[in-house]
Image (cartoon, rainbow, N blue to C red):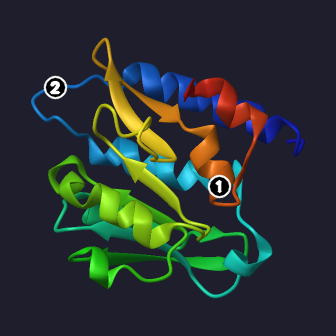
Amino acid sequence: MKTKELPRIFLTALLLLTGLCRVQAQTSDYRFHSVFMYNFTKYIQWPAAAQTGDFVIGVMGNSSIIAELEKMATNKTVGQQKIVVKKFRNVADISNCQMLFIPSADNVDFEAALAKLSGKSTLILTDKDGLGRKGSGINFVLVNGKWKFELNKDATQNAGLKVSQELSRLAILL
């Protein structure tokens, strides 16, 4: 398989997965979120300083996404970096991470987390309507019963992240 075909295959799979991920009884399908979060790493470039040590995915609060992310991270890397999932109980606990997921249940700390990570190369991910416009880099939203994601290009650029055009085309751009 040619290397140039991999992005097309991923994007096709991503579109199919997006279409198949309908909401049922739960408000959040964290399997979907964790798969997308891992695949985002293939289409977002972090500055060189963020590409050393482990690739840390932080999660605010006690969310069931932690177990899904840990399953996803088993034997996976981002480039040469091992993926590590860290739980942060509150904003004061937040330390260096390349991604920070703030579940809708913990969005009361959203503004404080934004302030704490200002100027850092951290992609902030959320899953609550309106947070994409408020500064989340990627916000998962339900559109007609299907999971989609908003991309705040200003937020990602301010974090020093470069988002590929392929990923931008799949996103709801803010």
| Quadrant where the image shows the N terminus | top right
Viewer-proximal residue among 57 and 67: 57
Tell me the number on the disc at residue 39: none
Above or below, 86 relative to 13:
below
Viewer-proximal residue among 122 and 38: 122
Q: Residue furthest top?
A: 144
Residue 69 x, y percent position in the rendering = 37, 63
Viewer-proximal residue among 120 and 150: 120
Residue 62 x, y percent position in the rendering = 16, 68
Count neighbours of disc 1 (C-alpha within 10 A) and say few if under 14, some if 14 to 19, many if 20 or more.
some
Tag 1–tag 2 contact (CB < 8 Å): no
Residue 114 x, y percent position in the rendering = 42, 61
**Residue 71 seen from this side:** no
**Residue 12 seen from this side:** yes
Left or right, 148 with respect to 76, comes to left
| Quadrant where the image shows the C terminus | top right
Residue position marked by numbered label 1 in the rendering: 158
Residue position marked by numbered label 2 in the rendering: 24
Above or below, 170 relative to 71:
above
Which of discs 1 and 2 lies nearer the camera? The answer is 1
Left or right, 129 with respect to 114, comes to left
Viewer-proximal residue among 108 and 146: 108
Above or below, 69 relative to 146:
below
Secondary structure beneath label 2? loop
Q: Earlier along the polypeptide chain: callout 1 or callout 2?
A: 2
Say which amino acid is labelled 1: Asn
Q: Residue furthest bottom?
A: 53
